[in-house]
Image (cartoon, helix red, strand yellow):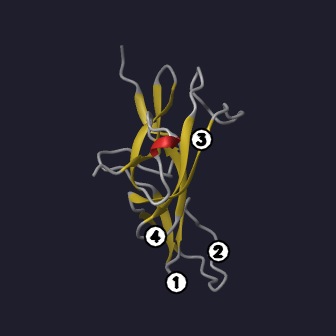
Amino acid sequence: MPEKLISPALDGWHTIGDNPQLLGSQCEECLTYFFPKNERECKNPNCSSTKFVEIPLSREGRIWSYTNACYQPPAPYIAGDPFEPFAIAAVELELEKLIILGQVAKGIDVDSLAVGMQVDMIIEPLHETEDEIKMIWKWHPKKI
């Protein structure tokens, strides 16, 4: 049986190698960070730049807010079959001070989370087809 292709669920949003990272952009003029990448005009109201550089973002942050997803999302979103509830966290990245929304790692529920908790970004499967595994970033509580 041939191996399945492993690829990002969202092309250009994150890497999936040994040291996975979210991919953002930074305005060359005012240094504002963006995720997902911004390639048009700076959204900082004090800047009119249209020049950006792609950058890898921090892999760690603190939970800003969190909730659970108890209902299967509608199309076009893909959920496991059968659907299993999962936790979602809004995480403020340490360096960039961006808040990034993402699922929490499999097996960690909302009762295990707290505002201010330190988390790391990991990569886990989002869904599989016959010949491909789509990977997505998730947040995992930092090991102490």
Identified by mark 1, the residue type is Glu
State which mark lies toward you, 2 or 3.
Answer: 3
Q: Quadrant of residue 4?
A: top left
Give the residue pinned by disc 4: 96
Coordinates of residue 138 in the picture (x, y in percent): 46, 45
State which mark lies toward you, 3 or 4.
Answer: 3
In three-dimensional space, the C-alpha distance between marks 2 and 3, rounded to whole angstroms, equals 30 Å
Of the image marks 2 and 4, the number of the one nearer the N terminus? 2
Give the residue pinned by disc 2: 43
Residue 111 versus residue 93 in the image, above or below: above
Q: Which of these two is toward me, 82 or 18?
A: 82
State which mark lies toward you, 2 or 4.
Answer: 4
Residue density around tag 1, few if under 14, some if 14–19, many if 20 or more, within 10 Å: few
Residue visible at 52% across and 83% down in the picture: 29
Identified by mark 2, the residue type is Lys
Residue density around tag 2, few if under 14, some if 14–19, many if 20 or more, within 10 Å: some
Residue density around tag 3, few if under 14, some if 14–19, many if 20 or more, within 10 Å: some
The label on residue 29 is 1
